[in-house]
């Protein structure tokens, strides 16, 4: 019973080939907006949405894009502490309450990107210009919270195998995934 978790939802896992990180963000924005358009085109559903949230509006495009490092700086400047009550620093996970403050302030959908590799999944692609961060994204929406998370995946087989080893995970069970990298 939180504004962040639903009792039922549809979960979509998608893979896109031969794209850049910006292509991924553009695609996510398109899919999110199209789903909302289709949903709100149904008069019955639209009526229920407006009863539950009379201030609902279609998402403004383009979505704002902000790197994790910028968000950490913004949270510090606005005196919003981390979960330990201290100033946010690089490497902290941004808690839901801090994300909510940020999105409520911006009052628009936000792609929060480039999270530190140490707090993300081992298979996420590192940014070639900033190797401490991943090409990863969370889409945050005011009044809702995170609705989409995603990333580019490591495409280099040797790099992926080294990541499995570093995490002490036997890659044998993931042959279907590692074979794609070959």
Image: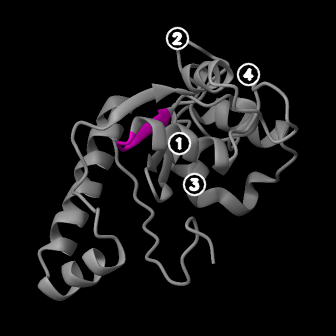
The disc placed on residue 90 is 4
Which secondary structure, mark 1? helix
Ranked by sequence position, the earlier of labels 4 and 3 is: 4
Q: Which residue is mark 2?
A: 129
Residues drawn in magenta: 107-112
Image coordinates for residue 139, horizontal then vertical, percent: 45, 46
Which of these two is toward me, 90 or 44? Answer: 44
Residue at point 33%, 30% (across, down): 22
- Answer few, some or many: residues within 10 Å of disc 2's Cα (few below 14, many 20 plus, some between 14 and 19): few
Which secondary structure, mark 2? loop
Does the magenta-highlighted stretch encompass residue 157?
Answer: no
- Answer few, some or many: residues within 10 Å of disc 3's Cα (few below 14, many 20 plus, some between 14 and 19): few
Q: Which residue is mark 1?
A: 181
Residue farthest toward the top in the current orientation of the protein: 129
Which of these two is toward me, 110 or 1? Answer: 1
| Count of numbered badges drawn on the protein | 4
Which secondary structure, mark 4? loop
- Answer few, some or many: residues within 10 Å of disc 1's Cα (few below 14, many 20 plus, some between 14 and 19): some
Ranked by sequence position, the earlier of labels 1 and 2 is: 2
Between marks 4 and 3 in the image, the one whose residue lies nearer the viewer: 4
């Amino acid at each position: 019973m939180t504004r962040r978790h639903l009792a039922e939802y549809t979960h979509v896992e998608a893979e896109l080939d031969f794209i850049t990180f910006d292509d991924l963000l553009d695609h996510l924005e398109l899919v999110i907006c199209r789903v909302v358009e289709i949903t709100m085109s149904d008069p019955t559903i639209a009526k229920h949405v407006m009863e539950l949230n009379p201030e609902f509006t279609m998402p403004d495009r383009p979505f704002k894009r902000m790197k994790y490092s910028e968000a950490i700086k913004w949270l510090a400047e606005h005196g919003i502490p981390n979960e330990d009550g201290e100033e946010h620093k690089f490497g902290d996970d941004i808690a839901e309450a801090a994300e909510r403050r940020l999105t409520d302030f911006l009052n628009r959908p936000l792609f929060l990107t480039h999270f530190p590799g140490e707090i993300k999944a081992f298979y996420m692609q590192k940014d070639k210009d900033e190797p401490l961060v991943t090409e990863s994204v969370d889409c945050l929406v005011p009044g809702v919270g995170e609705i989409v998370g995603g990333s580019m995946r490591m495409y280099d087989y040797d790099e992926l195998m080294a990541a499995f080893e570093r995490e002490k995970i036997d890659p044998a069970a993931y042959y279907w995934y590692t074979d794609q990298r070959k």
